[in-house]
Amino acid sequence: MANSNTKDMPVNPPAVWPVAGRTINQGVSSLAVLGVGLGFLVFAGSAQAAEDPARVIADLQRQIIAQQQQLDAQGRQLAKQADLLNSLASRLGPGATPASPAIATNAPPQDIAVIPSTDIKAVAKADAAPPELTADRYAAGQGVVVVDTPGFKATLGGALRTNALFSSARGIGGSAAPFFLAPPDATGAEKVFDITAQYSQINLSLEGPTLGGFSTGALVLFQFYNGAVFSNQYGFTPGLAFIYAANERWNVSVGRRGELFSDRAPDMVDAMTILGASGNPGNSVRSQVRVEHTAPMADGGKFTAALAISDPISTNISADFADRTEDNGVPNVEAKLAFATARPGPEVLLRRPAFEIGISGVYGEFRKFYNVQPPFSVKTYQIEGLALDGGLRLGDRFGVQGEVYQGRGLGNYLGLANQTVNAQTLKIVRGAGGWGEASWVWRQGLQSNFGYGLDRPDSETISVGSIGRNETAYGNIIWTVTPWWRLSAEGTWRKTGYLLPTKSLLSNDGVGLNLAAELRF
């Protein structure tokens, strides 16, 4: 989950300095010990000089050479540690996915390899990056350490978010997060206003010991909506809950995570739907086992390959799997290949690589039971999806990103306007979609994003009355006042078309304004 593009980290994170100080102190301590040792050697040599001066001098020369070699080795080690610190500081530069102890985010895209805590010691001991999350909607504050013992650390944090949405047309979805619009109301009563704190969150991150060169840890994230995103009721729902083991090349995670298929997300104030059902599938959550391998390049770029086996039945988004539906005995398989150039230095305002490209896919099966009385009927369906995403940064302030996809049965992945099976013909729904976004950074901490997304199910595969087209356009401004306080405003235009018996579409469209305030802790 996201997105992948937070802009509020300081240029030189304070957390780096304790490590740098400790490294320098270690070097000074080594020199002090060396000086004492040389003093003893000189004293011992003077006591033996009368016996054999040439032998003592030769012995001292050998020992000085050995000590010089040790100093050279320590100098190389200090240089290596300095390079590691510079690398970590770059990864924590302004706009990177928040390096919060309360959430182990990776871009992400949100893209984006970061560390699970501002305590750099946890990473330096294994040079590890935890699993990446790519959506900025998971960003949180620095958190408060509630347990800190040798080999174990627990940090509690989160974010309080309040969204207020005015719309000229009625939306369908959670409060202040409509996925699409309802058909035109015959009474003409269309305007709506919602204000909610449902998308606030509580995070608990755990950092465990280093095992065989792998840093271990876990993350739990709760949000305050009730069950599915379409619910308008408050609740306490787990969003993320996974454990991981990671080093500089491998990430292995198990639990509830963001979907691997189509994981790129736009930068929106409406960080819950993020163009879901309007061209952007994926970016929901489901239980899975994931393995990721990163191959770094000499210039700082990287290739990433990831594979996940995931839960075929998820009711986190839509309810179309809740009624007499079950898996077909095999998990879904999701995979992604991606390439990204090096992340920019702190002088670049738009915190994205100069070039990114990725291809992802998903395959799965499920079966639905029809007819509660004999003759019973059971049908098996296949889920298939293929997505191509990418991003391009032009200069220091401007960039574009986007994605296109096609597939069938992707309603459970926020695709095809959330449609999976034709209720009339009992056939799978097919279609395609995509989205694009342009971003501009006005100054440090102030950014605007403009985008458009479209879902277009194949009209031959959907039933009359179903959505045949869903599209959203938006523009926003996001102001990170401080690292813990953010204010945002987003204007939207949405249009949803419903299939008529004549194969034409009955459409409803409207404009909206979403205002948000966020406090991270």
Image: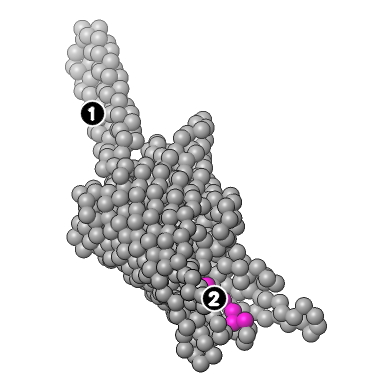
Q: Which quarter of the rendered picture does the N terminus lie within?
A: bottom left
Which secondary structure type mostly characterizes the magenta part of the structure?
A: loop
Numbered tag placed on residue 419 in the rendering = 2
Give the residue drawn at x 38%, y 55%. 515
421 is within the stretch colored magenta: yes
Q: Is residue 445 left or right of residue 284?
A: left
Residue extending farthest to the right is: 374
The mark closer to the camera, 2 or 1, is: 2
Give the residue drawn at x 57%, y 52%. 234
Above or below, 474 against 80 in this view is below
Numbered tag placed on residue 273 in the rendering = none
Above or below, 451 against 430 in this view is above
Magenta region: 416-423
Rendered location of residue 88, percent (x, y):
32, 44
Which residue, given by chain and number where applicable, does mark 1 sit on? 68
Amino acid type shown at disc 2: Gln
